[in-house]
Every structure is written in structure tokens, then in C-alpha cells.
């Protein structure tokens, strides 16, 4: 009786994880629903770095990249597909675009519970610190992704059990920061501008969690 109960519990967990994956990264039927989203992070005053903050101001976290055979990008993507039969470039890009909007929207609206399962520990800590700084300054971030113009996988690797896929996302965005009185103190509330973001998603191929996590962000000029 105990064995049957254990099987039912594990089956329920597996169904929950599958639904979680389909809702965030890697859904494999049709285009993801687009949500208007924002992203302009203000670096916390006490933690200001020398690196300039981009318009989209998502915290920039870079980690050393490990190169692995084969040499071509397609070859490395094929290697990841061998480790995960559900992985393919088109589905991953659809999922990355969906995650891009969810994460940016949650960051702008300060929904840390939504961010937590989608980000690596380092990225989450940086996003959460920026949200706290914004709250302390009594400022509100308003951002909207008008459209995603392009999304392209530009880097990939599989080192031991860790897969990393880097995507360049080009989008038109409207974003601004307002103070407590509603006055715009940064950005433009009416005009959109093109933003080029480079996001890296990471997944432990041996982990039970099927989700890819945002592990690095940077912006291109």
C-alpha cells in the first residue's frame, strides 16, 4: 500500500513540473502569448558598480564561459539535444521570448515570488536588491515591451551536466521611472526605443527541475 502511495505522489510531482515547464520555457505548440512587459533596473545606490547601467537596466551578471566540443554552434546545440530529447532551437526560442516578458514584467511590478523560480541565485539576488532600492527611493518603474523584433541563439555549451544557451533578444520598449509624485525622473513614458539584450539560460540536465534559469544578463549597444 505504501509503494502505491509513493507512486501516486511522484506522479503528481512529475505532472506539476511538466505544467511548470510548459508555462515558462520550452512550450512546444505555437507561439507564446505576448504580455506587455518592462525592464529598467535601477542599481542600488550602495551597490553601484562602475559598469554603466543600460536603459533596460536589468542587473548585469557575467560568468566565465566554458568552451566545449564541437566547435560549431549547431554542433553544441545538437549536443544539448542529445542530452535532452525535448530540446530544439525553435521551441527554446519561443520559451525564451515568453520568459523574457514574464521576468521583465515581474521585475517592473516587483513580483519577487514570480522571479524566484525563474532566476539563478546570483541573478535573483541582484534583481531583488534593485527592487528594494527602488522601493526605498519611492520610485515606480513603468516599462512595456511594444514588440520583440528578433530572437537568436548566439552561444551554447554543455559542460559535464550543465547546459548554457545564450539568446540575443531585440525589442522595442517604452520605459520610464517615476517618483512618488508621478513625475518621470528617468526614461520616456511615450517614446519607444530599440533595446538589444543578451540573456543566458542554464539548466542542470540531471536535475528533476525541467526549467531553464536565467543565469546571466547583459546589454548590447
Image (cartoon, helix red, strand yellow):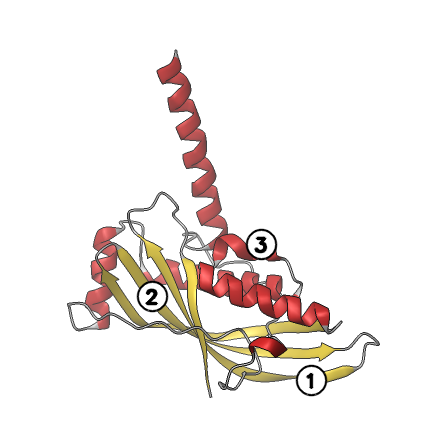
Which callout, 3 or 2, points to the residue nearer the camera? 3
Q: Mark 3 points at which residue?
A: 114
Which callout, 1 or 2, points to the residue nearer the camera? 1
Q: Eyeballing the image, is 145 above or below 5?
A: below
Residue 48 falls left or right of residue 120: right
Place of residue 43 in the rendered image (x, y in percent of width and height, measured from the top left): 58, 77
Residue that extends furthest to the right in the rendered view of this protein: 181
Q: Is mark 3 on a helix, strand or loop?
A: helix
Residue 45 falls left or right of residue 160: right
Residue that extends furthest to the front in the rendered view of this protein: 46
Q: How far apart are marks 3 and 1 (CA)?
A: 25 Å
Q: Mark 2 points at which residue?
A: 165
Q: Which mark is residue 72?
A: none
Which quarter of the figure is the N terminus placed in? top left
Residue found at x 15% / y 67%: 69
Residue 61 visible in the displayed image: yes
Q: Eyeballing the image, is 188 above or below 87?
A: below
Q: Is mark 2 on a helix, strand or loop?
A: strand
Q: Which of marks 3 and 2 is nearer the N terminus?
A: 3
Place of residue 208 in the rendered image (x, y in percent of width and height, measured from the top left): 36, 43
Q: Which image quarter: residue 198? A: bottom left
Q: How many marks?
A: 3
Residue 104 visible in the displayed image: no
Q: Distance between the residues labelled 1 and 2?
A: 32 Å
Place of residue 149 in the rendered image (x, y in percent of width and height, measured from the top left): 49, 76
Q: How far apart are marks 3 and 2 (CA)?
A: 22 Å
Q: How crowded is mark 2: few (under 14 residues within 10 Å), some or many (20 or more)?
A: many
Residue found at x 65% / y 73%: 143
Q: Name the residue under label 1.
A: 186
Place of residue 5 in the rendered image (x, y in percent of width and height, measured from the top left): 42, 18
Q: Which of marks 1 and 2 is nearer the N terminus?
A: 2
Amino acid at each position: 500500500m505504501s509503494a502505491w502511495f509513493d507512486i501516486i505522489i511522484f506522479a503528481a510531482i512529475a505532472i506539476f513540473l511538466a505544467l511548470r515547464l510548459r508555462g515558462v520555457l520550452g512550450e512546444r505548440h505555437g507561439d507564446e502569448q505576448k504580455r506587455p512587459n518592462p525592464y529598467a533596473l535601477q542599481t542600488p545606490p550602495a551597490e553601484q558598480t562602475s559598469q554603466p547601467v543600460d536603459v533596460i537596466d536589468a542587473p548585469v551578471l557575467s560568468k566565465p564561459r566554458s568552451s566545449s566540443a564541437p566547435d560549431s554552434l549547431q554542433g553544441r546545440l545538437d549536443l544539448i539535444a542529445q542530452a535532452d530529447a525535448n530540446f530544439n532551437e525553435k521551441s527554446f526560442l519561443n520559451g525564451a521570448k515568453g520568459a523574457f516578458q514574464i521576468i521583465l514584467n515581474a521585475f517592473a511590478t516587483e513580483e519577487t515570488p514570480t522571479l524566484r523560480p525563474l532566476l539563478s541565485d546570483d541573478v535573483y539576488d541582484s534583481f531583488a536588491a534593485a527592487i528594494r532600492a527602488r522601493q526605498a527611493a519611492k520610485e515606480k518603474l513603468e516599462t512595456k515591451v511594444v514588440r520583440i523584433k528578433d530572437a537568436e541563439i548566439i552561444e551554447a555549451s554543455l559542460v559535464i551536466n550543465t547546459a548554457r544557451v545564450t539568446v540575443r533578444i531585440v525589442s522595442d520598449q517604452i520605459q520610464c521611472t517615476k517618483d512618488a509624485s508621478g513625475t518621470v525622473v528617468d526614461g520616456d513614458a511615450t517614446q519607444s526605443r530599440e533595446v538589444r539584450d543578451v540573456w543566458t539560460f542554464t539548466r542542470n540536465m540531471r536535475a528533476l527541475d525541467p526549467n531553464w534559469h536565467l543565469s546571466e544578463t547583459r546589454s548590447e549597444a
